[in-house]
Every structure is written in structure tokens, then in C-alpha cells.
Amino acid sequence: MKAHDGMYIDGAWRPAAGSDTIEVLNPVDEQVVGRVPAGTAEDVDHAVRAARAALPAWAATPPTERAARLSALRDGLVARQDEIAETVTAELGSPLKFSQNVHAAVPIAVAGSYAELAATYAFEEKAGNSTVHLEPVGVVGAITPWNYPLHQIVAKVAPALAAGCTVVLKPAEDTPLVAQLFAEAVHEAGVPAGVFNLVTGLGPVAGQALAEHPDVDLVSFTGSTAVGRQIGATAGAAIKKVALELGGKSANVILPSADLAKAVNVGVANVMSNSGQTCSAWTRMLVHRDQYEEAVELAATAAAKYGDRIGPVVNAKQQARVRSYIDKGVAEGARLVAGGLESPREQGYFVSPTVFADVTPDMTIAQEEIFGPVLSILRYEDEEDALRIANGTVYGLAGAVWAGDQAEAVAFARRLETGQVDINGGRFNPLAPFGGYKQSGVGRELGTHGLSEYLQTKSLQF
Ligand code: NAP
Ligand code: MG
């Protein structure tokens, strides 16, 4: 795989301040596919200075010109889509088809949506005797995870650039190569030097330096709740804007009137996709007691068909973490009906698609985010019980409701404490705001709501 040995700062690839590097491994065969520099606080500081210096001119660039750069960036991602898919497959381990259809394709759609929004959004409003200007927040520190590595980058950088902000990105250490491809595309799109900067490195070093940098105005983070809490506290102490997209433990609620087989099969596919490493995955399936055993059988059969085709999880640590949850599920008395601790392959960080039945709401596997291909099936007595169980975690990122009648599903969805609900298998929409209720986060990404995170108002009274 192609890898740059420098940081993309102020419009060029520049040598890192230190000499440490990060080895990028392929989770399928555990082989090294590339090496990138491990950035330090010094690299972060260079990048933030470049972003600060570039801010006044970029903020003053007409939105239509910013839109033109974003449109060129989208085209650059289109031109690179094969390379992007191959790179994500190499560093994340996801099957190539999934990398093409999701990891490469979704960022193109999101970049395109912001090219359009930058051109059409009203950056000026009237309110009585005032004119309200929507101005960029300033320098953005973006910290992203590895599970949808390019999507999570584009979901932050595209709206930030559309708003007139400048950016320093610290991508996940496991997936820095696709971040470097993104930087190439930004460069070719004619985005001025310093507007976008990339510092690869470790979270507690480069990530923390970026989150703590006094000249960063807004920190946008996606990842674990533990790190998010720390970043939120740091930002709070500095009175900085912060956006946090954290974990989830979403419920897939199958009401008795639903098409059970369809709801179960789509539900299993949702959890197994990307090897279960999706923050919005419906990892708790809720089934009425009269349909429970039928659903369990359908889910077990569906899961067993996936085998190793879902790909591995991202690294050895994640594999161990997911296995420890499988252990815990068994220890707490859940019934294992598919998968388990045995890996479908000897080499690589594979975890068997796993399904637990007889999961009760208080069990660890029903409460904590596992981030692996593990589905828990819970039994409910009636609708009120289903609602209580669905809302009974600290999270509130996503969910699904299935019913014979759309209105019935919508009525139930409106009572869920969660930011996104798919009705009878509704499709992902890159224009819909994405983000969490409760401890799933603060702020929203995508569409106009995602853009407004990067804007602040200035009111002029006349
Ligand atoms: P993580 O540590 O929170 O990683 C997210 C990003 O934050 C990475 O770029 C990471 O760098 C960086 N980071 C880590 N420590 C930091 C610090 N002290 N200050 C600033 N930045 C820091 O998540 P993870 O270790 O990759 O995954 C752990 C768990 O998080 C998963 O099992 C899952 O439950 C959850 N997760 C959620 C999402 C989501 O989309 N909501 C995504 C990924 C993970 P490094 O890459 O160097 O660690
Ligand atoms: Mg980490």
C-alpha cells in the first residue's frame, strides 16, 4: 500500500518532528501493509498554526468558491474510489465489495452533499431589525476512529470546509492510509494551503495534543465514550465548542404485526455488517414472547451463514475485547445459539458471527457496546415492556422498528430515546442528521444540521 512518510501540513507533505512510526497491519493476515509517522505535540502545533494562518482568507472566500473546491474534492474521491476501497480493505480488513459499496461510496455522497449545501445554504438571515451572519467557528480539531475511516473524516471535514473553517485531522492509528489518500484528494482539489492539515499519530499523544491545543476553536470527535468524556471535559474547561459522536447499543424492535422473517434477517445483516463495528448497529433485537423462539431460530440460521465472509475485526485488542464479551454473555446465563469463542480462521482477527438468546436487559451484553459481530435477542411481554427495554441503556444513537403498518411503527419510534430510527428497513440517508441522545453524544453530523455545528451567529442590529 502507498504510504506517505510525512504529515500534510500547510499544503505539502512535510517531515514529522520526531522519528517514531506506526505500523499499519492487515487484520486478515496480520501482515504490515504500511508505515506512517507517529505525530507529536510539535507536529500538531505546526498544523494548528497553519490552520490558524489560513483561516481569515478561507472564511472570507465566497461560499460558491468553497463549494467549487468541495465539488472538486468529491470528484477526486470518485477518481480514487478503487484505491480507497483497496486501502480500507487492507487496513480495516473489510471485504472488498463492502469497501467499494460503503467505505468508498458513502464519502462521495457526503462530499457531494456538502458541495451542494455550500452553494445553496443561507449564510445570512433576517430577524426583525437584525441581519444574522452565520460565520465559521474557526480552527477545527477533528479526531476520527477506524470503523468507517473515510466516512468519519468526510463527515467532519466537508461541512467544516463548507462553513469556512480550517481543519487539523488526527485519524485513527489503525487506518491512517485512507486518511493520506483523502489529503491527496484535498490537495488536488485546489483547497488552499493550510485549510486542511493531517497529523497521523497515537490518540493519547497527537489526539490529546490536538484536543488540548489552545488555538483550536472546536473539537469534533468520534469514538469511544471513555475518550469522548475526557475530550468533553477538556473542551468544557477551555469553553470550546465540542461535538461528540460516541457509542451505541441500539434496539431493533420487532412488533408482533411485523414481517418477522424479514425483520430478523435484515436485523442480523445489520449487526454482522462491517464485522459488527458500527456505532449505530442494532445489537439488541427485541421480540414478543409469542414469536421469540421462531425469531431465535431464524437469527441463528442467518448468522451461521455468514461465517468468515464478514471479515475480521480491526485488531488483536478488539478481537480480545469482543471475545471477553462473549465469555461474559455465557457466564451471565445467556444462551449461545450461533458462533461463540471459536474463530472461523486460525490467522487474522476473526470473530464468529455470534447470537445470544435469553438475554435479559440487565446483562452486560445487553448494556455495553461490544463493537463486534454479536447480537443479543431479548424477549418482551407487551409494547410498554418493549419500550422500557429499548430505552433502558445509557445510549441513544439509533434503532429500528418493524410493524405491519407504517403508522404503528412511527408511533413507536417517536417514543424511542434515540437520534435515528429506521422504519421497516428504511435506508441510510446521508442528508439526515446523525447523532445521539443521552450518552451517545453531543451534536449532529451530516446535512444542514451537520453544517450548522461549524457555524456561529453574529447579529447586526439596524
Ligand atoms: P478511541 O480510542 O476512542 O479512538 C477514537 C479516536 O480517538 C482515535 O483517533 C484515537 O486514536 C483517538 N484517541 C484515543 N485516545 C485519545 C485521547 N486521550 N485524546 C484524544 N484522542 C484520543 O476508540 P478505539 O480505541 O479505537 O475503540 C474503542 C471502542 O470505542 C470500541 O470498541 C467502540 O466501542 C468504540 N468506538 C465507537 C465508534 C463510534 O463510531 N461511535 C468508533 C470507534 C470506536 P488511536 O487510533 O491512536 O487510538
Ligand atoms: Mg484507541
Image (cartoon, helix red, strand yellow):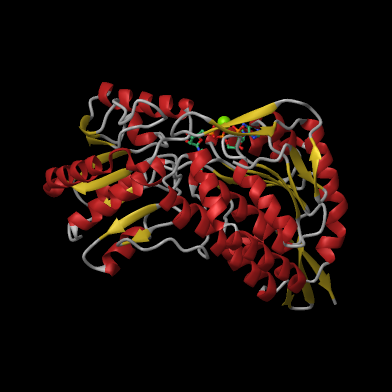
436 horizontally vs 134: left or right: left
Q: Position of residue 264 (x, y in %)?
A: 23, 51
Q: Relative to 43, does residue 62 appear above or below in the rendering?
A: below
Residue at 79% over, 27% down? 18
Picture quadrant of residue 455: bottom right
Residue at 34% over, 50% down? 270
Q: Position of residue 262 (x, y in %)?
A: 22, 57
Q: Nearer the viewer, residue 367 or 150?
A: 150
Q: Residue furthest top?
A: 331
Q: Position of residue 140 (x, y in %)?
A: 73, 49
Q: Nearer the viewer, residue 288 or 261?
A: 261
Q: Is residue 254 visible?
A: no
Query: In which quadrant will I find the N terminus?
Result: top right
Picture quadrant of residue 144: top right
Q: Nearer the viewer, residue 153 or 83?
A: 83
Q: Quadrant of ligand 1?
A: top right
Number of labels in the image equals 0
Q: Relative to 257, does residue 30 appear above or below in the rendering?
A: above
Residue at 62% over, 64% down? 74
Q: Relative to 441, does residue 18 appear above or below in the rendering?
A: above
Q: Position of residue 377 (x, y in %)?
A: 25, 41
215 horizontally vs 441: left or right: right
Q: Residue furthest front?
A: 1
Q: Is residue 106 visible?
A: yes
Query: In which quadrant will I find the C terminus?
Result: bottom right
